[in-house]
Every structure is written in structure tokens, then in C-alpha cells.
Amino acid sequence: MVPPSPPAVVARGVTKRFGDFTAVDGLDMTIPKGAFYAFLGPNGAGKSTTISLLTGIYAADAGQLTILGVDAKAHPLDLKRRIGVVPEELALFERLTARQYLTFCGRMQGLDGAVAQARCDELLAVAELAHKADVLVAEYSKGMRRRLAIAAALIHAPELVFLDEPFEGIDVIAASVIKELLGDLSRKGVTLLLTTHVLEIAERLATHAGIIKAGKLVTEGSIDELKAKHGCPSLEAVFEQQVAVPQARSASLSFFGRAP
């Protein structure tokens, strides 16, 4: 029998502090290889800080982090060649065209010029940006920029991709293209970590999920495992149970519905 592949991400006791504030507090996380992992939590729970730790932007103050079987602290550069990152706040080179930008990203990842160009053309087509390939990024809409950022994160064929709120502030068409692209990557065995506030998207796309609250991972597992474990009919119900529904959910305004 073929032994099971090691997890793509293993975090044990990972902690990150900013002065007196603990943003990530003893985080334990396991992401199976090939999983589509929805990383969920309320605003300020520590999702973006965790991604920064996993991608090497921040160094952990404590704990052990293994990514793709490699000690993240000991081999940060090796890991950066094997992962792709789409941050929430995009920083694209606006004075380049999309074709120039993707080719540049490919070359920076060590791809041969011809290979970078071929992958650029394929990515532009898949992201439905081929008709705007020679337009400056400065002229792109927010949804087009998001698709371009995802394409840039994929050009070197990473084994693990981190996407921080890729559906934030984009239209239905752009969201549909991104969902199709991510679904295709998942079917091809690429490990994905996605943060999103749109739980319907998370439940439709993800195979696994983890919920973070106040810097601590409160639960994780496959979607089916989480629903069974917490006795909930949906991932959204699991999330609400673990995070607690805000009191405003049942609030109403007294001055509506009255005669003037």
C-alpha cells in the first residue's frame, strides 16, 4: 500500500504577538495535502495574521510550523518557490500591461522566457483576461485585478496557494470566474487555503474548514465531519455556533412600520 501523503500544513502552538496584543494564540492547524481549506472567522480573529505567518511575511514568536513537509523557519526561501499567495490588499504594477506583469512574475520565479510567455497566455485565457492582455493594469476594474493577481500567483505552478478574501468587493461575473478556476485547481490536487466571509461559497467549494476566534482555532476538519461533530445542517450553522451570533441578529428598529 502507498503510505498517505504528509499534510500540506501543520501548525503546532503557533503564536504571534504585536506588543501586548496576541493576534494568534497557540494555533494548532492541520491542512491535508490536496484539500480546499476554508479558513473562517469574524473580523479581527487572526485570519490575515495567520496567512502572513504561513507565507513567511511574519515570523512566529512561538510554536512549530511545517509546510509541504519543510520546516518553515529553517527553509523560508525554498518554500516561497512552492507556494502562491493572493493577498487581500493587492499591489500590482499598474504601469505594466497584464501580459507584461504576468511574464515578469514568471521570470521572477525562475521560469524560462518562452515558458513564462506560454503560461501567461494560458492564464490570461483561463482568467478571461485575454482580450485585455495588452491593456495597462491601471485601467483594470477591481474584479479584473483580482483575477490577474490569482493568475500571477499560479504562474509557477505552486503546490499550495493562499487566497485572502478573493471575493471581496467584486461583481458576480468576476466571482464566477474565480470560483470556476479554484474548483479546477482543487480537482487537480492543488492545496488551497481560502479566507472568505461568504459562507455559501466556502461550503460549495471547500472540502475542509477551520474556524478561528480571538486568535485560537476552535474547530477544524472536513465539512462533513464538522457538521456531524457539531450537530449542524450547514457550515454556516457550525460557524454561528462556534463564533456566537451577534445580538444585532434579532434587533429591530422601533420607528419603522409606524404611521408618520
Image (cartoon, grey):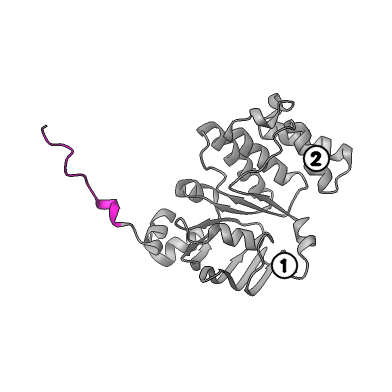
Going by the picture, which residue comes out furthest to the top? 131
- Residue beneath label 2, please? 104
Kindly identify the amino acid type of the residue bearing the numbered disc 2.
Phe
User: Where residue 49 appears, x then y in whole percent?
Assistant: 57, 60
> Is 229 in front, or is 57?
57
Residue range in magenta is 247-259
Residue 162 in the image, given as x and y percentages of width and height: 64, 53
Q: Where is residue 176 in the image (x, y as percent from the top left)?
A: 55, 36
The disc placed on residue 259 is none
Q: In the rendered view, would you say 30 is above or below 47?
A: below
Q: Which amino acid does label 1 sit on?
A: Ala
| Residue 177: image location, x then y, percent | 59, 35
What secondary structure is marked by label 1?
Answer: loop
The quadrant in which the C terminus is found is: top left
Query: Residue tagged by mark 1?
Result: 72
Residue nearest the observer in this picture, 122 or 257 = 257
Q: Main secondary structure of the magenta part?
A: loop
Residue occupying the point 67% across, 51% down = 85
How far, Cα to Cα, is label 2 from label 1?
26 Å
Q: Is residue 173 magenta?
A: no
At x 72%, y 45%, the residue is 154
Mark sitting earlier along the chain (2/1): 1
Q: How crowded is mark 2: few (under 14 residues within 10 Å), some or many (20 or more)?
A: some
Left or right, 76 with respect to 57, comes to right
- For numbered disc 2, what is the local secondary structure? helix
Horizontally, residue 162 falls left or right of residue 47, namely: right
